[in-house]
Amino acid sequence: MDPNSPPVESRHYFKGAAGLVVAIAVVAVLLIALPGYRWFFLISVGIGLVVAGILRLWNKWRPVKEEDVHDNKRPLGLS
């Protein structure tokens, strides 16, 4: 790849709510058409719920304190 070549524009066919609707439709079709995906989906959702619960409890019992927050919001000086 040539370092002096202009950047390639990315094409986003589905933005915002349309992308979400397409993603839900694809998941629904896969869950209906391919039974193997059902188990994968259920296991993935279960793992996600367990991780979300652990993070929620962690942040409830050990909330972020003021001294834990750094004052420098842009450590690299980028604006």
Image (cartoon, grey):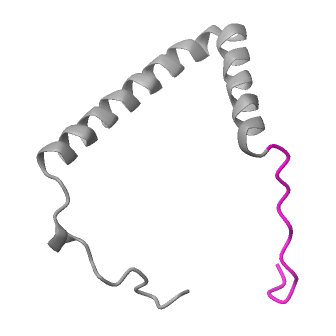
Q: Is residue 22 left or right of residue 67?
A: right
Q: Residue at x 26, y 39 (%)?
A: 56
Image quarter for residue 79? bottom right
Using the image, determine if residue 6 lies above or below residue 44.
below
Instruction: Judge whether residue 6 is colored magenta.
Output: yes
Using the image, determine if residue 11 lies above or below residue 47.
below
Main SS, magenta residues: loop
* Residue 9 image point, x, y percent: 86, 67
* Residue 4 image point, x, y percent: 84, 89
* Residue 16 image point, x, y percent: 72, 44
Using the image, determine if residue 33 lies above or below residue 27.
above
* Residue 71 image point, x, y percent: 29, 82
Q: Residue at x 62, y 8 (%)?
A: 35
Using the image, determine if residue 78 lies above or below residue 34.
below
For the image, the number of numbered tags is: 0
Furthest residue to the front?
66
Q: Nearer the viewer, residue 78 or 44?
A: 78
- Magenta-highlighted residues: 1-14
Image quarter for residue 75? bottom left
Instruction: Judge whether residue 37 is colored magenta.
Output: no
Q: Is residue 24 left or right of residue 59?
A: right
Q: Residue at x 19, y 38 (%)?
A: 57
Q: Nearer the viewer, residue 31 or 65?
A: 65
What is the quadrant of the N terminus in the image? bottom right
Q: Is residue 4 left or right of residue 27?
A: right
Image quarter for residue 8? bottom right
